[in-house]
Image (cartoon, rainbow, N blue to C red):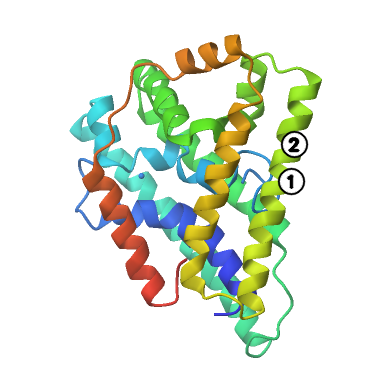
């Protein structure tokens, strides 16, 4: 898999499809960048993975929300529909590259890919939120903030609620730009043969760790307190669910179809 296909696969399959397929393979019933590139707008890949819609695929989240059997059935159907659309989109993109001959096709338009991803994710999330009641939606929002961590501070709505000033917004934008450059550099190193694909995830995780620490420094003491209150009661994630997600990623990665 060349850099072009790898970047797109990381964004599409690694972020949105794998959390859903991990749940689907369990048999269902009880179970997880905004547009603009690897580190821009909307909180990046980690934020999308921990979006409200994707989190509902997790067994521990559904347990916390106390979803009913009827709700689970509807959520499973929405997840399958979304997963199938994403896989079809990826296949179309991959087919176009193969048709141009080997690995020499034009580089995919990542902005267009992210635009489609954002639109599809919004449609999916809107459907999920309609299945849940008002109390469940509120709680899901709190869980999403906890799972996103400080990357949630890149969300414009969160910034508005915390009353960010112009300087704080500028600092966030600068951090996002730095994150984007750092992650793009990782993919460039893969293309140059300096590192293997298996090293992408650990390096990006380290970038996320650095970003998380820097984002926390942007907040005032009052904003830090308000941000903690927005997260609500602590959500206890089940390590077994995390392990299932990691195993699913590893299975895909071994076959060259994931990150």
Identify the residue position indicated by label 1 in the image: 177
Most foreground residue, 206 or 121: 206
**For this view, does 42 lie left or right of residue 134?**
right
Q: Is 23 rendered above or below residue 169?
A: below
Q: Residue at x 47, y 28 (%)?
A: 145
Judged left or right of residue 219, residue 127 is: left
Mark 1–mark 2 CB contact (< 8 Å): yes
From the top left corner, tell me how far across and down residue 165 is, in percent. 76, 17
Please tell me which residue is depicted at 53% across the width and 12% down the height of the picture: 226
In the rendered image, residue 64, in percent from the top left (x then y), is placed at 26, 27
Residue nearer the viewer, 14 or 213: 213
Going 57% across and 50% down the picture, which residue do you hit?
207
Q: Nearer the viewer, residue 160 or 108?
A: 160
**In which quarter of the view is residue 158 placed?**
top right
Q: Are there few (<14), some (14-19), or many (20+) residues within 10 Å of tag 2?
A: some
CA distance for labels 1 and 2: 6 Å
Q: Residue under circle 2?
A: 173
């Amino acid at each position: 898999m060349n850099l072009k296909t790898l970047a797109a696969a990381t964004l599409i399959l690694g972020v949105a499809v794998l959390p859903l397929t991990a749940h689907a393979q369990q048999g269902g019933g009880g179970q997880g960048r905004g547009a603009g590139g690897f580190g821009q707008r909307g909180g990046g890949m980690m934020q999308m993975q921990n979006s409200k819609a994707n989190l509902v695929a997790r067994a521990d989240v559904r347990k916390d929300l106390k979803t009913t059997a009827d709700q689970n059935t509807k959520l499973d159907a929405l997840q399958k529909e979304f997963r199938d659309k994403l896989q079809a989109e990826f296949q179309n993109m991959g087919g176009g590259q193969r048709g141009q001959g080997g690995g020499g096709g034009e580089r995919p338009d990542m902005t267009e890919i992210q635009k489609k991803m954002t639109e599809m994710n919004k449609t999916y999330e809107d459907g999920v939120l309609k299945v849940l009641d008002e109390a469940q939606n509120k709680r899901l929002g709190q869980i999403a903030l906890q799972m996103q961590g400080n990357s949630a501070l890149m969300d414009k709505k969160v910034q508005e609620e915390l009353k960010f000033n112009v300087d704080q917004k500028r600092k966030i934008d600068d951090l996002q730009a730095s994150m984007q450059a750092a992650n793009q550099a990782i993919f460039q190193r893969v293309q140059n043969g300096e590192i293997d694909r298996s090293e992408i995830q650990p390096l990006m995780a380290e970038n996320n760790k650095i970003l998380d620490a820097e984002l926390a420094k942007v907040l005032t003491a009052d904003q830090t307190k308000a941000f903690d209150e927005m997260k609500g009661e602590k959500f206890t994630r089940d390590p077994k669910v995390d392990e299932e997600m990691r195993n699913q990623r590893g299975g895909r990665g071994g076959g060259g179809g994931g990150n």
